[in-house]
Amino acid sequence: MQEELNQPAVTPYELIGGDAAIRKLVDRFYQLMEELPEAYTARKIHPADLTESGNKFFDFLSGWLGGPQRFVEKYGHPMLRRRHMPFPIGPEERDQWLMCMKMALEEVVENVSLRDFLYAQFVQIGESMRNRGENLQGCCH
Ligand code: HEM
């Protein structure tokens, strides 16, 4: 029992495969967004060059999954909802973003429970990024 308590908890960051797996997920995610015509509405609200978007998303995911807190160290509190406010995100943009993420997760994350868990989290956060359309959440950060 004591030994179990002393075991450090395994983080999603470790489970997914650390930096290399996160980088693969991010690269594949933006590649799909770039290539799929059915993701064009989401693609076109992003910068022409997705390199920095990928780097920032990598930094964010690293900390969010329980690894190094790179995003917070570089840019401060994520305040994700506020950072997405300049971009029109309605149901279509949300669904296209989620579609790319679902496909990227299926290719990159072999552990099905981890994959399903991560996708469910993205669905929730994705909905809270929405700033167009009906029944918007009142939250401001
Ligand atoms: C609902 C669908 C979403 C859309 C359409 C969307 C779109 C965008 C856009 C247009 C940007 C700014 C350009 C850029 O830096 O790439 C951005 C930034 C970012 N997004 Fe999203 N996003 C969505 C969901 C999410 C989710 C679910 C997360 C995290 C789990 C996330 C994390 C980030 C981060 C960390 C940044 C960089 C923020 C910054 O420092 O400016 N996004 N997103």
Image (tube, grey):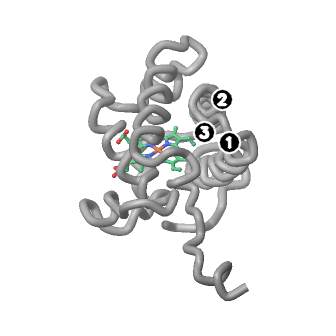
Q: Of helix, strand and loop, which one carries label 3?
A: loop
- How packed is label 2: few (under 14 Cα within 10 Å), some, or many (20 or more)? some
Is the CB of the residue bearing disc 2 within 8 angstroms of ligand 1? Answer: no
Q: Which amino acid does label 2 sit on?
A: Glu
Label 2 close to label 1 by CB (< 8 Å): yes
Question: In this orientation, does residue 138 appear?
Answer: yes
- Relative to 38, does residue 9 appear above or below in the rendering? below
Is 90 or 128 nearer to us in this picture? 128
Gap between marks 1 and 3 measured at Cα: 25 Å
Which residue is drawn at the image coordinates 57% and 56% (left, top)? 12
Which residue is drawn at the image coordinates 24% and 60% (left, top)? 74
Q: State the image coordinates of residue 52 (x, y, percent, origin top left).
A: 27, 37
Q: Is residue 107 left or right of residue 53?
A: right
Residue 2: quadrant of the picture:
bottom right
Q: Residue farthest to the left?
A: 74
* Earlier residue among tags 2 and 1: 2
Q: Of helix, strand and loop, which one carries label 2?
A: helix
Residue 110: quadrant of the picture:
top right
Is 76 or 109 nearer to us in this picture? 109
Tag shown at residue 115: 1
Gap between marks 3 and 2 measured at Cα: 24 Å
Q: State the image coordinates of residue 54 (x, y, percent, origin top left).
A: 36, 37
User: Badge 3 is on which residue?
Assistant: 90
Q: Of helix, strand and loop, which one carries label 1?
A: helix
Q: Which amino acid does label 3 sit on?
A: Gly
Which residue is drawn at the image coordinates 43% and 64% (left, top)? 79
Q: Is residue 131 left or right of residue 61?
A: right
- How packed is label 1: few (under 14 Cα within 10 Å), some, or many (20 or more)? some
